[in-house]
Structure formats: C-alpha cells, structure tokens
Image: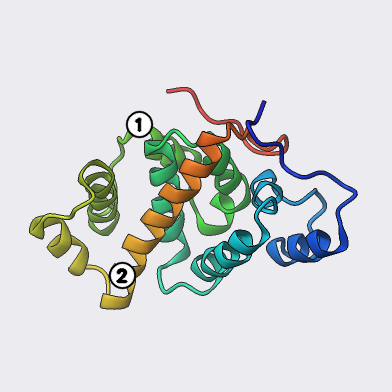
Amino acid sequence: MPRIEPLTPPYAPDVEQALRKWMPPGVAHEPLALFRLLQHHPDLASRMRVLGAGLLAHGELPALDRELIIARVCALNDCQYEWTVHATVFADQVGLTPSMLQATINGSADWPPHHRALLDAIDELHTTAHLTDAAWNALADHYTTPQLLEIVVLAGWYRTISYIANAVHLAPEPWTTPYPTT
C-alpha cells in the first residue's frame, strides 16, 4: 500500500487537465499512479512534467540508449514501478529484448562497446556520483557533447523518479510486464 495514495477519479477539473498533459493521446488506461501521486503537489508536478517529457520526446540520444539508461538506473535503485512501465511501454518500440532487459537487472550481457561504456558509466554514477576520466572518455568516444550532458541528466532524473516511487511504495501498474526475479 502506498504511503501517499495517488489521486483517483473523479478528478477536479484542474487535475484532469494536468493529467491529460502527462499522458499521450488515446491511452486506454488511467494516468500512471506516479502522475496521479505528483498531483498532490501540482506546482511540482508541472515543473517535473516539462523535464520528463523533454527527456523522453525531445532528447538527442538514440531511443534504445535512453531506455537502457532508464532500465539500468531503475534496476540499480530497485525501482520496480518505473522499470516495469518502461519495459512494457518502450522496450519493444526501441528494440530492447527480454534478455537485454534482464541484463539491466543482473548487469551481465555482451554489449557492443558504446552500450558497455554507457552502462559502465551509469553504474559508476550510481555508486560514486562521479565519473572517472576513463569512464568519461569511453562515453566521449561514442557520444556528442549534448548527448553526454543528456546521459548525466537522464540518469539523475530517473534516480529521482526511483526515489519518489520507492519512498512512497508505489506498486507496479497492473498492466505492466512483471519485474523479473534474478
């Protein structure tokens, strides 16, 4: 049971309007519990939506690389809520296979060099909040300066999302792919 219950319908008109901004048109299910939770603080939610939507829809990273970062950050933080949402909604779209998803949890896979550099950097950021010159240079061999900045912001953003979902005990959405056991 969540420590803070996400809002449920019927929504006040301003909440309904805000939730519509979070969800893509034509989605058949209720807005995500995370979005409904954040509406307890509408000003915070509206500021967060801008960055979150920007990272998902307007980033410079390849979609597969973006989803690898998200899956690995969520796995490192044991954020089953957000990991399962992205595994369900985005994995097939970006070519993230079930074995690749599993590897974001257990860390093992034979990744191509750019993904190995990316995932090693995410692990290092998670553990130390720093990147060594070796990790930075490995990333810089494969990514542009704007992409390097986006990698760091994306990792930090999904760590923040993990903190929120984990702190309030959000259960995975009922329609998502189950989180694998390792």
Q: On the image, which quarter does residue 13 sit in?
A: bottom right
- Please give the label number shown on residue 106: 1
Instruction: Indicate which disc residue 139 carries.
Output: none
Left or right, residue 84 beside residue 26 = left
Q: Is residue 97 visible?
A: no
x and y, in percent, of residue 117 in the image: 22, 54
Which quarter shows the C terminus?
Answer: top left
Using a 10 Å C-alpha cutoff, classify the residue at mark 1 as few (fewer than 14 neighbours), some (14 to 19) or many (20 or more).
some
Earlier sequence position, callout 2 versus callout 1: 1
Q: CB atoms at circles 2 and 1 under 8 Å apart?
A: no
Give the residue drawn at x 55%, y 44%.
87
> x, y percentage for residue 129?
23, 50
Image quarter in which the N terminus is found: top right
Residue at the spot 44% in from the left edge and 46% down from the top edge: 71
Question: What amino acid type should be assigned to the residue bearing mark 1?
Answer: Asn
What distance separates the C-alpha of mark 2 from that of mark 1? 26 Å
Q: Nearer the viewer, residue 13 or 21?
A: 13
Q: Position of residue 84 (x, y in %)?
A: 57, 40
Q: What is the x, y in percent for residue 58?
A: 51, 74
Asked if residue 20 is positioned above or below residue 77 in the image, the reply reads below
Is 72 drawn above or below residue 135 in the view shown? above
Q: What residue lies at 20% left-to-right and 45% top-to-bottom?
A: 128
Q: Please name the residue shown 63% across and 35% down the image.
A: 172
Mark 2: give few (<14), some (14-19) or many (20+) Cα within 10 Å: few
Q: Is residue 92 left or right of residue 78?
A: right
Kindly identify the amino acid type of the residue bearing the numbered disc 2.
Leu
Eye-nearest disc, 2 or 1? 2
Can you identify the residue that label 2 sits on?
149
Apparent side of residue 137 relative to residue 94 in the rendered image (left or right):
left
Instruction: Say what secondary structure mark 1 lies in.
Output: helix
Disc 2 is placed on an element classified as helix
